[in-house]
Image: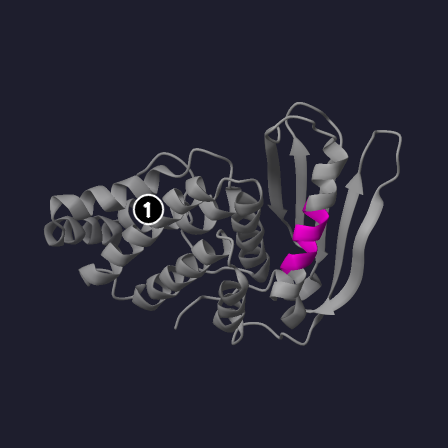
């Protein structure tokens, strides 16, 4: 396997001009902020495709993804938009899209060609999720995954807000919906509404909101997101989606 990777690397370098090499290398550095799901799905995979195991940092040596990965990507892209960091996100995802386009056009990764094409389409749709007009992008991602998952499956969703350490979490939304409804503008609109409630709970009187950060954690049962203000332990916004078995079934993406 390593000999094959070495051969692919030399073949790739012979095919690319210097600007293309630069495009690929910038994508392997990763982003300057914490987007663990994006780093795992995109950055780590590009590192492995180009260098195999001969590289520092996380790598993803298997092509398979899960539904939890895809939902985690959507949450990360969408929250970058809601926290007014869409410019930073666009900068990162453009590097990823550029590198994937170079790898696809190189003709070197024949076995991974369909996977790379699929990831490129996904990254383009995620850029749309990270912008104010996300409705078509979420529908496009739903179509992209439709052959891998049963969209009629039900999932349990919760969005909760906790304003103080002594207060029980206020349930802003809790319902069972299908995967089809989960990957929809309607569900993202619920997150927007909850985020507005979260900003009210901050009780910030200044002209700009304080720094808001979030962490996304895909696990075997689903995806969990915690949104918080870096200067205070409270309030916090929690988004939890319990997908169950459908969430961690692995599949190899292709078009």
Residue at the spot of label 1: 95
**Element under label 1?**
helix
Q: Residue at x 27, y 58 (%)?
A: 101
Q: Residue at x 36, y 60 (%)?
A: 120
- The stretch of residues the image draws in magenta is 188-195
Where's the C terminus, which quadrant?
Answer: bottom left
Q: Give coordinates of residue 191: x percent, y percent.
A: 67, 52
Residue most extreme to the top: 231
Left of 138 or right of it: where is 193?
right
Between 205 and 146, the one lying in front of the other is 205
Query: Does 62 appear in magenta?
Result: no
Between 162 and 62, the one lying in front of the other is 162
Left of 147 or right of it: where is 178?
right
Q: Give coordinates of residue 85: x percent, y percent.
A: 49, 40
The vertical placement of 235 against 115, above or below, is above
Magenta highlight: main SS: helix
Between 135 and 10, the one lying in front of the other is 135
């Amino acid at each position: 396997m390593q000999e094959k990777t070495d051969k692919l690397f030399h073949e790739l370098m012979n095919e690319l001009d210097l600007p293309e090499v630069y495009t690929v290398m910038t994508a392997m550095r990763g982003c300057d902020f914490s987007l663990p799901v994006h780093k795992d799905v995109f950055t780590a995979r590009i590192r492995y495709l180009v260098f195999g195991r001969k590289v520092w940092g996380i790598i993803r040596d298997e092509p398979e993804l899960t539904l939890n990965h895809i939902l985690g990507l959507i949450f990360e892209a969408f929250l970058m938009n809601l926290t007014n960091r869409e410019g930073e996100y666009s900068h990162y995802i453009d590097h990823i899209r550029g590198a994937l386009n170079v790898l696809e056009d190189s003709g070197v990764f024949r076995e991974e060609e369909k996977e790379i094409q699929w990831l490129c389409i996904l990254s383009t749709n995620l850029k749309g999720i990270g912008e104010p007009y996300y409705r078509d992008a979420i529908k496009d991602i739903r179509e992209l995954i439709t052959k891998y998952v049963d969209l009629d499956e039900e999932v349990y969703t919760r969005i909760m807000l906790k304003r103080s350490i002594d207060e029980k979490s206020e349930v802003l939304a809790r319902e069972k919906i299908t995967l089809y409804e989960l990957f929809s503008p309607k569900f993202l609109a619920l997150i927007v509404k909850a985020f507005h409630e979260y900003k009210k709970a901050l009780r910030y009187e200044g002209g700009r909101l304080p720094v808001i950060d979030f962490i996304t954690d895909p696990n075997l049962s689903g995806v969990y997101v915690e949104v918080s203000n870096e200067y205070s332990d409270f309030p916090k916004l929690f988004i939890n989606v319990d997908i169950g078995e459908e969430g961690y079934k692995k599949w190899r993406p292709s078009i």
